[in-house]
Image: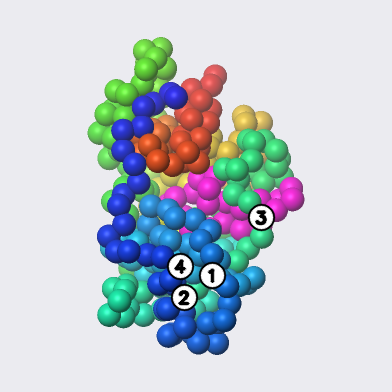
Amino acid sequence: MTVRAVRGMPAAEVEVSVGLVRRLVAEQHPDLAGLPVEVLANGWDNLVCRLGDEYLVRLPRRALGAELAAHEQRWLPELAARLPLPVPAPVRTGRPTEQYPWSWSIVPYFPGRTAAEQEPGTCPAAAAQLGHFLAALHFPAPSDAPVNPHRGIPLAGRAEGVVSGLAHLADAADRRAALRVWESATASPVWDGPPLWLHGDLHPANILIDGERISAVIDFGDLTSGDPAVDLSVAWMLFPAEQRADLRRAYGRADDAMWERAHGWALALAVAFLTHSADNPLMNGIGERAFRAVLAP
C-alpha cells in the first residue's frame, strides 16, 4: 500500500436497512411496494438499494448525505436535459417520517459496472465521452447553486489534508515526487472565471461502463460550483496517458494552468481516498491507481 489507511468510512447516524427501505416505499409509493429490494452499495453518504428492475433507492445514512440528496433533488432534473450521458435525476422522492428523519430518492437504474471494477484503459472510447460530458456540464452556475467548501475551491484550501496524508507515505522518494507535483499545481494560476457547475465527486466508482462505452455518470451528491479542474482530475484516476490526452481534446478548453490544477486535484483526492479506505478496498484501489498515475512521468 502506498499510503497507510488511518480511518474508515464515516459512521451511519441512523440505522438504514433493507427493511427500512421496504417500509418507506410501501408507505409513500405503494404502487412500488411489491418490488424486490436488495442492497447494491453502502457508501459514505447513502445506502443504495435495487428496487425491482428499473429503480434504485438512495437513502441517506447521515445528515451530510441528506443535505447532498437535497441538492440532487433540486438541481439534477434541470441539468439532465443538457447532458450527453444519462444521470440519476430522481424520478420520485420520499419525505421524512417518525422512523426516518430525512428526504430520500428513487432514481433510475442504469446498466453496467463501475469503472472502478475494471482495468484502467480497457474502455478507450470513454475518455472522449467523458470529455464531451464535462464540456456540457461545465457552464456558469446560478448564484443559488450549492457551494462545497472542499470541492471546486483553490487548491491551497486542500493543502493541510495533502501534507498530512503524505506523511503516511512509506517511501521517501514517493513523498518527494508527490510534493513536487503538489507545489507545481498550487503555483499555477487560480481559476478566475465564473463558478461553473461541477459534478464534484467524479471518480471511477461514479462512472458506469456497459460494453465499451459509458452508460451513466452517477452520484451527484457533491454537485457544486467553482473551478472545473476538480472534475478533470478523473483523467488521472481512470485513464492512461494517451487516453488522458483524448479527454483533454474532447473537453476542448483546458489550458495548461487548468490541467496542472487538475493534476494537483488528482493527487489531493488520491491521498484522501487512501487515508480513508481502511474498510473500503474499492476506494483504496482507486486511490492507489490515481496516486501512481499522478507520479508517473
Mark 1 in CB contact with mark 3 (< 8 angstroms): no
Q: Residues within 10 Å of mark 4 (few under 14, many from 20)?
A: some
Task: Quote the CA–CA distance across marks 1 and 4.
Answer: 7 Å
Q: Which residue is mark 3?
A: 112
Earlier sequence position, callout 1 versus callout 4:
4
Mark 4 in CB contact with mark 2 (< 8 angstroms): yes
Q: Place residue 216 in its image quadrant.
A: bottom right
Residue type at tag 3: Gly
Residue type at tag 4: Val
Mark 2 in CB contact with mark 3 (< 8 angstroms): no
When the figure is inspected, residue 9 is found, relative to residue 15, above or below; the finding is above
Whether residue 92 is in magenta: the answer is no
Q: Which residue is mark 2?
A: 22
Earlier sequence position, callout 2 versus callout 3:
2
Earlier sequence position, callout 1 versus callout 3:
1
Task: Quote the CA–CA distance across marks 1 and 3.
Answer: 19 Å
Colouring scheme applied when the structure was drawn: rainbow
Mark 2 in CB contact with mark 1 (< 8 angstroms): yes
Q: Position of residue 177 (x, y in %)?
A: 41, 17
Q: Which residue is mark 4?
A: 18
Question: Which is nearer the eye, 244 or 112?
Answer: 112
When the figure is inspected, residue 213 is found, relative to residue 240, above or below; the finding is below
Q: Secondary structure at mark 4?
A: helix
Q: Position of residue 69 (x, y in %)?
A: 39, 66
Residue type at tag 2: Arg
Task: Quote the CA–CA distance across marks 2 and 1.
Answer: 7 Å
Q: Residues within 10 Å of mark 3 (few under 14, many from 20)?
A: some
Question: Which is nearer the eye, 221 or 109?
Answer: 109
Q: Position of residue 64 (x, y in %)?
A: 30, 60
25 on left or right of 172: right
